[in-house]
Image (tube, grey):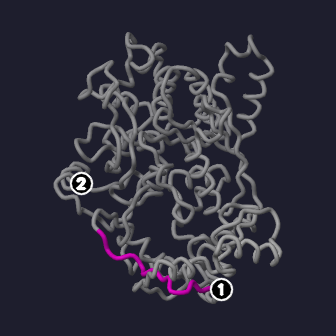
Amino acid sequence: MCRCSSPLPSSVINKISLFSQVAVERVIVSLDVSDLYEVPLRLNDQNLCSILLEHFQLNPKLHIEYPILGKWKALTRQMELASEIVHIAIVGKYTKLSDAYLSVLKALRHAAIYTNLKLDLSLVCAEDLEENTRIVSPDAFHQAWLTLSNSNAVVVPGGFGQRGVEGKLAAIRFCRERGVPFLGLCLGLQCAVIEFSRNVLGWKDANSTEFDPNTTHPVIIDMPEHNSGIMGGTMRLGRRRTLLYLSEISKSYLQRTYKCSELICAHLDSQSKVLSECRANDSYTSSKTFNSDSIMHRLINAPYFDARHRHRYEINPKYVDQLEESGLIVVGRDAEVGNRMEIIELLQPLHHLENDSNLENKCPTRHPFFVATQFHPEYTSRPTHPSIFFVGLVLAASKRLSAYVHNPFRLSPTQFVLDEDDKKDTVDLFKISPSKKLKDTVSHCSRESTSTCIMDSIDSKELTLVPHVLSSLCCESPVFI
């Protein structure tokens, strides 16, 4: 395989073939392309799949009704057609090397492709947002805040250590008070809880025991089954199940705060029953569509899902009730015991609009998207299956989240559309079958309701539905959110 910036002339290919003792048709040229996702298509144009299958004498027995690369072609075409730009800032402390947050960058890219948007990413050093930087380096301070102010959404990714934490807290407060879409990951969730505790609940010394072991309000603590101070083997790692959850305190807060809301917390009939059934039976699924005031409940639309974890600290269960009474609610808990907070969401109204006299008779204004997770959804995001948490953030950044939430079956060309030319694409010998029913799955909706919802929302003359996508919306593929 020859990497090059321009096409190789046939004379060069023949010479490479001669001196490498490789057939001419097996000299593959890998040209520089404008986007990484175009590489598989360029390689397929040179029959690389057929060459490999023939060389290794592979004879796949699985078949499908459509070409596998047709969907990938639709994805790359969608990237070219996107015109609207969303500006998203990532606030972290490893900003000099973007690869430090590569999974987050890619997950945002996947979500932007899915939502037909172009992504403009900015890395903001958390330390530059701190008050000390205003004195030491005022230019860096003002540039960091200017970048943050011009962003349509903000992500605070995971990490360890105290450096830059105060800057992250400042960025989170900015998002919470100004209504800027926010997504916190791992440490980002912990910082969101600390910020809310300090500035809303008034606990000025609220902190994590990682940063201040002597704080009088340890809202973030080391996991109790681990030995404090001993680092070896003390992380909660790997695939864990999260149950969507809404406590009675949260429901009461919603009913009290948003009396004129069309949705009054019509969650599962008995949350305790769901918790016990899911712990007792791993195959538990439900086709019931969530009708909840939680944005993430509506986006996920399933009783539980699996996600990858990598953390040592967690929210202190002792303070959860007080957080929820003030509007920072837990919408997801672990399925093992139910005392670990996996997802939080801000339902507190935006105060700068709440005091407007013109809005006296209207519902309080909700924050468009303020969500944080203890797990890492970026680890399982894929170009054709983006994480719903990043999709929600990007949709909120483009002010399209409300429309999507109320019509979750709107189709994205990257997942559902094949042109007539795409149907003609072939990969010799290489076919893949639609996904078979597997264990450990989540039911989004019944097959009948899926087909009805989709067909009601589009013109069947204009679009060709890829068969396996209907299956992926139902309960026939394992769900990693």
Which one is earlier in the sequence, the residue at label 2 or at label 1?
A: 2
When the figure is inspected, residue 430 is found, relative to residue 84, above or below; the finding is below
Image x and y of residue 20, in percent: 66, 70
Packing grade of label 1 (10 A; few <14, some 14-19, many >=20) is: few
Which picture quadrant has residue 447? bottom left
Q: Is residue 265 magenta?
A: no
Q: Percent x, y for residue 148?
A: 71, 34
Residue matched to label 1? 462
Q: Which residues are magenta?
A: 425-438
Mark 1: secondary structure = loop
Q: Is residue 355 visible?
A: no
Q: Is residue 358 above or below residue 452?
A: above
Kindly indicate the quadrant of the structure image that contains residue 286: bottom left
Quadrant including the N terminus: bottom right
Question: Which three-letter amino acid code belongs to the residue tagged 1?
Answer: Glu
Q: Which mark is residue 274?
A: 2
The picture quadrant where one finds residue 278 is: bottom left
Q: Tell me what residue is drawn at x 65 percent, y 33 percent.
A: 95
